[in-house]
Every structure is written in structure tokens, then in C-alpha cells.
Amino acid sequence: MITFKLALRNLMGAGLRTWLNILVLSLSYVVIIFLHGLLDGWNQQAKTDMISWETGQGQLWQKNYDPFDPIRLQESYSPVPQELSSLVREGKLSPVLVTLATFYPEGRIQSILLKGIGTEQQVLELPTSALAGLSEEIPAIIGKRMAETNKVQAGDLITIRWRDSEGADLAAELRIMKIFSCNVPTVDAGQVWIPLDRLQSMMKVPGEATLLVSGQEELPDLTGGEWVYKDKKFLLADIDQVIKTKSVGTSVMYVVLLLLAMLAIFDTQVLSIFRRQKEIGTQIALGMTRWQVVGLFTVEGAMHAVLAALLAAVYGIPLLMFGAKVGIPMPQGTDTMGLAISDKIFPVYGAGLVLLTVIIVLITSTVVSFIPSRKIARMNPTEAIKGKIQ
């Protein structure tokens, strides 16, 4: 207890030098926690949006389906299994049929994925109810990115061309019923959604689908058949990899911030030992062991981290809470990166994140303070009282 009191008194006696070190270290606390919280918030938002708009709680893929191999789409549909028909009727499973098509907005040409989905499905947040009603024209919905890229508006009549299961080239006109806004580009860019039964008729594959999106995590075991189950971990692996990569990149900034703060503490300790040699010699002469004095200087350095944490809490908590409440706006153009990212990211700060950051900084400060303090153990108290350096 005496050591802590002496350490605190010495720090307060150092005045401005102490507070500058504490300020720099507190900034490190706040920035590290903020960046971690921003990544965690993006991770949670992206996964929530992807589950709501694209992946559901899991999917069953037709065994030939590969989203990165559009050439095989013509072989990637099979009848919906009978054992799953009850889940489809109950709205817990949504069949989706996917094929390649060509889009002709205002005379331009673009290759697209034409997707059929049930108009009454409840698994995904797609506004599929807008697809119901038309009988002669083919109703369609598209995302905002798709509409902006092709200068399409709701109500436009667009020509499309596709190839059916027998290899025949066909063409028809779509009526754009609704343009939806979505943070997940993989259900928006280069895609057009139409009623499932209409696409099945156009493709001449009645009752068949390419994938089945589930609203529940448990599905009957269909291993060895035409369908392969893909869980959320598999479907969300891309966003997990992106977040992991971003975490590694931001770690460089963490290290730089810590090094700056630790350098300031190290220099302060070296200068303090140099200036306080007479004090050190007097303490040893009065009965303190050399390692007790080393401990005193080490505690002084460690208390920089403690005081910095308190200062960071004073101004950091309001700032971080404000950012978590109003969100952090993302720059323009982020919606074209191909990642699930919203206009604003709301950081998420867990108790574990804050505690881990404090512990890391505290341990690092203690080690950095101990390194120059070891010189005290080799001091001759008589020479130290005289102010002579050994």
C-alpha cells in the first residue's frame, strides 16, 4: 500500500509530463476499443442482413449448383423433395430457381441471374408480394443498385431473353413492379426476381428449384440425394473471412498506438531514474532494498495505464456510446464493394473487449516500466546520493 501511495505521489509531482503520458495512453484505449467495436458491429449487421435477405437459417443446394460457376446453372435444378413439401406449404422453406438470362434496358444489354421465388414466401425479406397480381406480363422486382446501374424505374417494361431446359432461346417482357433497397449486394446487383411458378413455366421445369432457403436451422437429412445442406457457417464464411482480414489490418494501427504510448512511458522512466538518483540512493540508505525501489518505479509506470483508463472512461464512454447510438456513416461507394454493408455501422462494445484492452495495455505498461528500472538494482547507494551515474 505504501508503494502505491508513493508511486501516486511521485506521478502527481511530475505534473504536466505525467498528464501528457496519460492522455496519449487514454487515446490508445479509446481508439483500440472503437475500431474493435466498429468491426464487431459491422460483423453483426452484415450477418443479420445476409440471414434476412439471402441465406436464411440454412439452405439446401441442388448437387450441381455452384454460385461461382454460372455455366452449370442449366444443370442445377431438381424437383423439390416430397418430404419437404409440407415445410414449403407452411412457409418455413422457400424454393428458388436460378438461371442465366440477358437483360435489355433501353436497348442496352446485360447478363443477369434470373431468379424465381414464391410470391407468398416469408423466409426472406424480399418484397415478393409485389410479384402477385399480373397475369399477362411477367412481374419483376429488382434492387436499387440494379435499377441505378441500368437507369430503370418502377413500372418500366424490359425485354429479357433466356434459354429453357431444352436449349431453346426465348424472349419476353418484364414489368418492374418494385425497386427494393437492400444492404446485401448478392441479392441485388445483376439480379432480377420473378414469381417462381412463372420461371418454372418459362424454363419448362415444373415443380423444380435450384436451392431451398430455410427459415429454421434443422432440416431432414437428405444426404446422398439430389440436395446438399449448407449451414449458416458455410454461407456466412465470406463475411467472416473479410472481418478476419480487416482485423489483421487494424492490428497494425493498434501496435503503432501502443508503441507510441509505451515509448513515452519508457522515456519518462529513463529520465525519472536519471533525475532522481539522489532520491533513489536515499531510499536505499534508509532501508529499502534495491528491488523494492525497482518495484516502486515499475508501479509508477503501471499506474500510467490505470490513470489513463480512468481518463479514457471520462471522455471515451460518452463518445463511444454516442457513436453506438447514432451510427458511423460509411463513405459513398461502399455499396458497390460487393460486401454486405449498410449506410451506417453501429459499433458494438462488449465487456470482454474493454477488459481485454485494459489488461493488455496494463501489462505492456508494466513491462516497459520495468525494463529501465532494472538499472536501479545495480546502483551504489553512496554514489547515487552524490548524483553520480554508474
Image (spheres, rainbow, N blue to C red):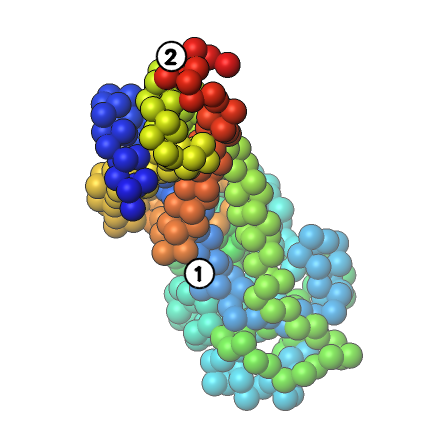
Front position in the image: 390 or 340: 390
Q: Answer with left or right where residue 369 lies relative to residue 203.
A: left
Q: Are marks 2 and 1 in contact (CB under 8 Å)?
A: no
Q: Amino acid at mark 1?
A: Thr
**Where is mark 1, residue-wise?**
48
Which residue is rendered at x = 28% and y = 42% of the image? 2
Vertical placement of residue 291 versus 268, above or below? below
Q: Nearer the viewer, residue 160 or 73?
A: 73
Of callouts 2 and 1, which one flags the residue occurring earlier in the amino acid sequence?
A: 1
Give the CA separation, mark 2 to mark 1: 68 Å
Where residue 174 sits in the image (x, y, percent)? Answer: 50, 57
Q: What is the secondary structure assignment of the residue under circle 1?
A: helix
Q: Position of residue 84 (x, y in %)?
A: 60, 85
Does residue 254 appear in the picture of this structure?
no
Q: Mark 2 falls on what kind of element?
A: loop
Asked if residue 138 is positioned above or below residue 212 in the image, the reply reads above
Residue 226, disc: none
Q: Nearer the viewer, residue 351 or 39?
A: 351
Where residue 316 appears, as percent x and y from the top left, is 27, 41
Circle count: 2
Work out whether 79 lies above or below 160: below
Q: Which amino acid type corresponds to the residue marked 2 in the rendered image? A: Lys
The residue at which mark 2 appears reads as: 386
